[in-house]
Each structure stands twice: as C-alpha cells, then as structure tokens.
C-alpha cells in the first residue's frame, strides 16, 4: 500500500503538510483566494520554502479538486 508521506520523510516537510498550510491560509481569507507570492512568503516564514515541494503540494490540491488556478491566484473551491 502506498502512502502520501514516506516513513523517511519529516512530516513538516511533506507535500501534505505544505498543502495543509496553504488551505489553512485560504480559509482565513474572506475572498478565498491567495497569490502564489503570498504562499511563498508564508512558507518562507515557516522555513519550508522548497519550490519542488510547493509544486507537488499545489498539484495534490488541484488533483483532489480542492483548489483552482487563475493567474496569479489560487482559489478555494
């Protein structure tokens, strides 16, 4: 059985956790949208800014139909 988090990976650096942080920030916003620049700033504050992990996190959220994109914003569905 495959899992979303590897046993060798730190949970706080996983794509699932980064996706959680993105969704948490989206839920705080009244208009339910956030720019990619705001996400990068958020992850930089958390010391989690990794372009590859960010891309995979956004792909996970999009593939599960939780978010949608309209340049430069990410919308919560």
Image: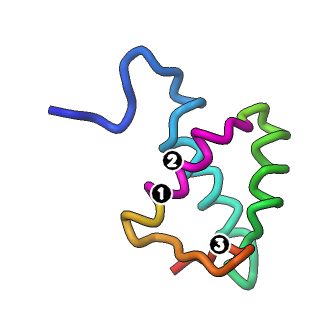
Residue pointed to by mark 2 = 56
On the rendered structure, is 55 left or right of 66?
A: right
Residue 4 at x, y = what percent?
A: 35, 38
Per the image, label 2 sits on a secondary structure element best described as helix
Residue 13 at x, y = what percent?
A: 59, 30
Dot 1, crowdedness within 10 Å: few (<14), some or many (≥20)? Answer: some
Residue 2, magenta (yes or no): no
Per the image, label 3 sits on a secondary structure element best described as strand
Look at the image and give the residue range highlighted in magenta: 49-60
Nearer the N terminus, badge 3 or badge 2? 2
Q: Give me the residue at 51% from left, 47% from top.
A: 56
Q: Give me the residue at 78% from left, 50% from top.
A: 40
Nearer the N terminus, badge 1 or badge 3? 1
Quarter of the view holding residue 8: top left
Residue pointed to by mark 1 = 59
Residue 22 at x, y = what percent?
A: 64, 57
Quarter of the view holding residue 72: bottom right
Q: Main secondary structure of the magenta part?
A: helix
Residue pointed to by mark 3 = 74
From this view, report whether residue 59 is shown above or below residue 70. above
């Amino acid at each position: 059985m495959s899992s979303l988090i590897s046993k060798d990976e730190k949970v706080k650096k996983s794509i699932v956790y980064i996706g959680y942080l993105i969704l948490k920030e989206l839920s705080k916003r009244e208009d339910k949208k956030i720019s990619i620049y705001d996400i990068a700033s958020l992850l930089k504050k958390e010391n989690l800014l990794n372009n590859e992990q960010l891309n995979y996190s956004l792909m996970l959220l999009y593939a599960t139909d939780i978010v949608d994109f309209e340049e430069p914003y990410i919308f919560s569905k």
